Image (cartoon, helix red, strand yellow):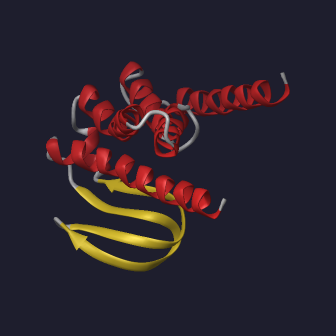
Amino acid sequence: MFLFTINVAVSFVVAMILHEIGHWGAARALNVRVLQAGVGWGPKIVGVTIWGVDCQLRALPLGAFTRIDMAGLQRRPVGQQLLVLGAGVGMNLVFGLLTFGTTFGLINLALAVGNILPLYQLDGWKGGMVICRQIFGGRNPHAEWTFTILGGLLVTALVVQALFV
């Protein structure tokens, strides 16, 4: 049981790092500046600069992030914006399929599916915002709040369905 727990923890952290490398790589390929990347939440434990990017390890390894120059990304065509936002999910799908049947594969697939959900600040929500802004010709607070609230309700309904039906 101890080795399984270690396997899950390491697999989760590596899958998160691969996810963020997907965003980072897509942004760099499109000459969009990556400002910061990290694993974890809370206070910074250690940081190094890699290719001009402030990379950090934070106290609670429960998530990961890549901070991109959003003004630079928003000047790109919609397809390129969606490519950068979806590249993390793409990485998790690729590694999930390549390692299918393993704990690492399952965690990658779970991260990919979880991140396409339209929940606030997840990749699916960010992609939805890009599409909303394209449809409405810019920011539209009513459409964006509607998308955000409906996304939350959709995910809530999916969780209730999975747990109680």
The answer to which quarter of the image holds residue 84 is top left
- Residue 71, placed above or below residue 56: above
- What residue is drawn where x is 79% and y is 29%? 160
Provide residue 108's location: percent of width, then percent of height.
46, 41
- Looking at the rendered image, the quarter that the C terminus falls into is top right
Provide residue 41's location: percent of width, then percent of height.
53, 66
Give the total of numbered labels: 0
Question: In the image, is 161 to the left or to the right of 127?
Answer: right
In front: 144, or 45?
A: 45
In front: 147, or 38?
A: 38
Provide residue 145's location: percent of width, then percent of height.
59, 33
- Residue 32, placed above or below residue 35: above
In front: 62, or 120?
A: 62
Question: In the image, is 157 to the left or to the right of 22?
Answer: right
- Residue 44, placed above or below residue 165: below
- What residue is drawn where x is 46% and y is 39%? 105
User: As drawn, which residue projects farthest toward the bottom?
Assistant: 45
Provide residue 116's location: percent of width, then percent of height.
49, 32
- Looking at the rendered image, the quarter that the N terminus falls into is bottom right
- What residue is drawn where x is 49% and y is 65%? 40
Question: In the image, is 86 to the left or to the right of 1?
Answer: left
The answer to which quarter of the image holds residue 48 is bottom left
In front: 143, or 160?
A: 160
